[in-house]
Image (cartoon, rainbow, N blue to C red):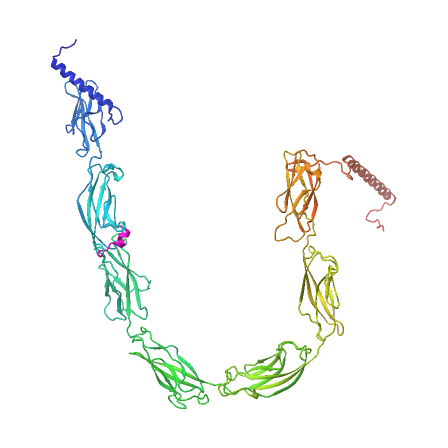
Amino acid sequence: MEENLSPREESKMASTQLHALCLLALYVTSGYSQEGRFSGPLKPMTFSIFEGQEPNQVIFQFKANPPAVTFRLSGETDGIFMIEGNGFLYHTRVLDRETRAVHHLQLAALDSHGAVVEGPVPITIEVKDINDNRPTFLQQKYKGSVRQNSRPGKPFMYVNATDLDDPATPNGQLFYQIAIQLPSINNVMYFQINNKTGEISLTPEGSQEVDPARNPSYNLVVSVKDMGGLDENSFSDTTSVDITVTENIWKAPEPVEIRENSTEPHPIKITQVQWNDPGAHYSLVNKERLPQFPFSIDQEGNIYVTQPLDREEKDAHVFLAIAKDETGKLLSKPLEIRVKVIDINDNPPTCLSAVTTFEVQENEPVGNSLGIFTAHDMDEPNTANSILKYKLVDQTPKVPSDGLFLIQEYEGKVQLAKHSLKKQNNPQYNLTVEVSDQDFKTLCLVQVNVIDINDQIPIFERSDYGSKTLPEDTAVGSTILVIQATDADEPFTGSSKIIYKIVQGDTGGRLEVVTDPQTNAGYVKIKKPLDFETEPFTSIVFKAENPEPLVAKVDYNASSYASFNLTVTDVNEAPEFPQQIFQAKVSEDVAVGTKLGSVSARDPEGLAVSYSLRGDNRGWLKIDSITGEIFSTAPLDRETESLYRVQVVATEAGGSSLSSTAHFHLALTDVNDNPPRLAKDYTGLFFCHPLSGTGSLIFEATDDDQQSFRNPQFTFALGRESLRNDWEVSKINGTHARLSTKHTRFEERVYEILILINDGGRPPMEGTVSLSVTFCQCVEGSCFRPVGKREGIPTVGMAVGILLTTFLVIGIVLAVVFIRMRKDKAENPQSPEARPLRS
């Protein structure tokens, strides 16, 4: 039964139905459900909605279970979230995440009387962020300062911007960068910014180049973008940064000078270093790795010397000062500290040796220098502390007078002061030299030795040593005479040592004279063999002289010369060859009777010489016994022996028939006289029968002739025309060839293939070789041939007959022997032990 409604009520109902239909349309076209569904029962749910969405958007439709007929929404609705009686949840205004990011609601189901029959349950609305806020710098202008030479990458200031968008999304992620640097120098950026934190620092170039003397300040335009700077539609903002460059005070101090061996209380401050900002941690590095490092630094940067320094131990020190931050990281490069140790006169002069020795000749003129005396001072050179003065304070002995020597005050030159010395007066003087600097004196010893001068000549004890006769075969090294001269100069010096020379009569250098260093005696010895035929008689003249030159106006005279006559007697000697090896080279194909070379020898006594050969094992050579010419007597063969060696014997034609030998080497050069041949024995070549396809075999050729600098170049061909139907041969290289079948229709037998091999020489030589190739049945890759009857070999039947006949003969022989033994036993019944042996 329908209820009659007033026109007003009908209008209101129609309006409600129209609104419901609109919500339903929006509901159908949108889906905020957590699970992607548009409707469902009442239960706790969470919905995510982007801010900025159009209002009146349906979020979800909750369905009530009877007796529930409507819903009630409460909590943080902010007048935005509504629910219809039919369960449609929607929002009436645009959402703003920055106003409220999460709405916590409660939803209950009511019956027709308004009583809660289900719920309330929590409904959570998360407002998702969109990029609807631009980043903004906290200041429109920033100011900062940086020290020159600051460490690159170390922040000295920062800028900061904010963005109201969600920082957990790209919308709120900010990206900083420097847009402009003024002044811009060669388009090089001196400053850099951390694009995430906004920290500003120097680049490596800026650390080197920023200098308040050149540019005291810089201006930067810094921009910030949201969306991480990666979206072209991101929002941005800019700010201005003014940077003042201040002077770097982290500089190496001037070199420090410290007087050595200071007696002041230590430690003593000597210099200071300072980092640009407070809070740095200072330390020193012992750059020279001294075992004891005499310097320290405090945390104010003050550097101290901790103990007295010794210039003579080390005259300068170089070490490093380091500044680090609180994390232990270097703030800048280390500074080099230089310390020079100033000298004081704290070292006396020292003598270079216990005694300094000089020599003076006994005829030395007055004023001549004997040498330079030098002492040493460990104080700094070329200063007043190390300048030395020399003074001669004593002379021992004072003969023939005192003051025989003097010394230059600063140079230290020792000179002869009065007159020439005589060794016989005194051979040695001891001098005391006082060496002094500004504060110290030291005494040093000098020894002067008077040395003899060569004013005496050697004198022979005899001027004539007579005559001596020696056979010409006297052994080399034999002493044939002893000569003696004396010298009045000081013994065992260059002035008295005697050297003997042969100045006449020994043009061939057959003699030498060796001096005894103790007695000056001269031993005349044979240095080279004597030769009666060349020099049967000679008159020798000796000269005795000194290795030291004689003084002026003293010369050698006749007393320094002596003579000696030597007669050499003849000894019969064997002929002599001028050389021990004679050589010749000929081609191996020279004709028999060709002259190959010649040898010669001479007899010292002038006798005729006869020649013969020894060791001609192959009988290739003969020699003319008179002329020494050598000829071939048989064909030569280089392949048999390429270098033929024999001995040549030269014998006196008369007299004692003495002989000597030399060697004759005959080198044979090659001619192409050997045909090519196979390099090895190619037996057992086979193909498995029947052939499944064409086959091939490889073989190698060689040649006994001498090979040239290039490898052999053999050519190969089949030896008979008839072979070309079945076989072909092809060259692989200069020494190898391939033999191939041309078809597969071969019988099961042995084939003999003749191959022609040509060496291409001058003249060319050709050889014919044969390759035996067997076609046979194969078992496991090996050739198998059944045994058949061969000539001279019995068949199996014949072999069995022969074996049976042999057994029959053996049986007959054994039977005869057995019968004979029984007969003998019957005739002579003696035991075997008593039976006599038969002869």
The residue closer to the viewer here, 545 or 764, is: 764
Furthest residue in direction top, as rendered = 1
Residue 64, horizontal then vertical, whole percent? 21, 20
Furthest residue in direction front, as rendered = 762
Residue 687 makes an appearance in the image: yes
Mark count: 0
The residue closer to the viewer here, 145 or 211, is: 211
Q: Is residue 469 above or below residue 133?
A: below
The answer to which quarter of the image holds residue 568 is bottom right
Judged left or right of residue 10, residue 409 is: right
Quadrant location of the N terminus?
A: top left
Residue 169 makes an appearance in the image: no
Which residues lie in the magenta part? 203-213
Furthest residue in direction right, as rendered = 827
The residue closer to the viewer here, 85 or 466, is: 466
Q: Is residue 2 above or below residue 827?
A: above
